[in-house]
Image (cartoon, rainbow, N blue to C red):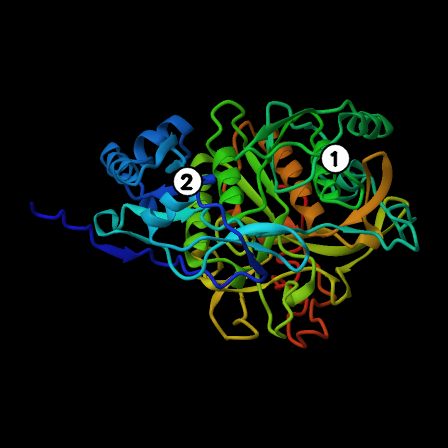
Amino acid sequence: MATQKKAAYIKLPGSKKTKPIGTEVSTDRNQTMEVTVRVRRKASIESHLNSGKQYSREEYEKMFGMADDDINKVEDFANEYHLSIAQVQKGRRSIILKGKVSDFEQAFKVKLACYKSPEGYSFRGRTGEINIPEELKDIVVGVFGLDDRPHSRPMFQIAKRDGNIIARKALQSFNPNELANIYGFPTNATGKGQCIAIIELDGGYRTTDLRTYFSSLQIRKPRISAVSVDNATNKPSTPDSADGEVMLDIEVAGAVAPQSKIVVYFAPNTDEGFLNAVTTALHDAHHKPSVISISWGSAEKNWTEQSLKNYNEAFKAASLLGVTICCAAGDQGSGDAETDGKVHADFPASSPYVLACGGTRLEVNNSKITSETVWHDSNTSATGGGVSEFFTLPDYQQHTKIPLSASTHFKGRGLPDVAANADPDTGYNIRVDGEDAVIGGTSAVAPLMAGLIALINERTGSNAGFINPKLYSTPHLCRDITKGDNITTRTKKGYKAAVGWDACTGWGVLSNM
């Protein structure tokens, strides 16, 4: 009897992972896990990106979602290796596979192992490339979830503590609605009819804190709900945890646009979880977010090429769906928390299809701005910003004086695009886990901008969507910030503020459109 010929395999481009840092421990290969397979679009969106036309989620799925034939091929592959189909999401272009560790190892020709990190947490990791059957070449564009090591960090910073866990009077601090008035946000809108999506990769919120907080601002608490992605849930714990990020995001966005609906998408802090949270929010036909706030990220060097490309493709889809993506640009200066002495841009803020949000230090007297400069307190407390070393210079920046990368001289996408108050010493009054705190970071700027976009959308009666081309063609929409830099002693390289666009604060403070 003739033996069955084994399918030829190829390496999945851009899927190479470095060896995990940690001690390898016993791996249960009968453990059940889930993996997200990303599939190509049935039709290219490239010619539609600059048309200005916006599509409903139903239209997008019909025109650009997964093709049935491609889905069938992935399902046949899964069945061959005893993997079941947990979900098929055509618009998200995601097929969720479920099965045993050993079956995934065979299906993708990888070795999976469990590790314990130096910090004491456990995770599953892999080294090298993922392999796929040759017949799935160009059909499968990404595989996420084989490796679930923690991936990103929140970009919030608590004002210096002086011995206390949280409480400390900052140099000057602001309620978010007060800051919106100082910046001149629209006063004839409340965000009514808008939905702001917030991506969170850890932590949680307490409804009692939100009631207390908005009551103190004399604002009716917005309608807030949580969506579970990949089994993650709203899990509040202690004030010095990621709860600070969650509460900062909700309270800032809610104070600026109090009649908007706020939906928090909780996902695991993994490459797969982060991507699935973004695509779930983007294609949520029930809540229909018009703006998404993201305050988590990491230096570009920490992402695989398949991750950078797949996230960026999701952000491209957002531009067609009329959804604005606001991303924190980083909170540790030009080095973005890396210790190699080089400059690094933070992703997802470095995607050309998001609004990258940098940070300033704001001083006010009698509700009037007396000084606003680049936020830069120290090596570990300064706005991110710089030049991407992966994404090339987008069309809308062609006539802007974007410098070359200070490390590699790559001609890439410059960030941020805009900025606002982020220094924790001139930060935001926030309530978290029963405590009052002053919190800053570019984490605060992303929800601040998300709230502003919600106000603009309500006022105009349409979604602003991908605003970067308009922003760069009409830069007078921003108030320029011309003093300061994000050069840290760790990197000794970085960028300085200047008249016009710069890689610290972009065009400056956006107040209206």
* Residue closer to the observer: 234 or 24: 24
Say which amino acid is labelled 1.
Glu
> What secondary structure is found at the residue carrying circle 1?
helix
Residue 176: image tag: none
* Left or right: 278 in relation to 204: left
Picture layout, residue 267 above or below residue 304: above
Identify the residue shown where x is 44% and y is 45%: 29
* Left or right: 281 in relation to 357: left
- Res 12 quadrant in image: bottom left
Task: Give the Cα distance between marks 1 and 2.
Answer: 41 Å
User: Is the Cβ of the residue at disc 1 closer than 8 Å to that at disc 2?
Assistant: no
Identify the residue shown where x is 61% and y is 73%: 340
Picture layout, residue 486 above or below residue 46: below
Q: Which residue is mark 2?
A: 100
Which quarter of the image is occupied by the N terminus? top left
Q: x, y percentage for residue 255?
A: 75, 33
Q: Residues within 10 Å of mark 2 (few under 14, many from 20)?
A: some
For residue 356, say whether it is visible: no
Foreground mark, 1 or 2, reads 2
* Residue closer to the observer: 309 or 163: 163
Q: x, y percentage for residue 113?
A: 48, 54
> What secondary structure is found at the residue carrying circle 2?
strand
Identify the residue shown where x is 33% and y is 49%: 106
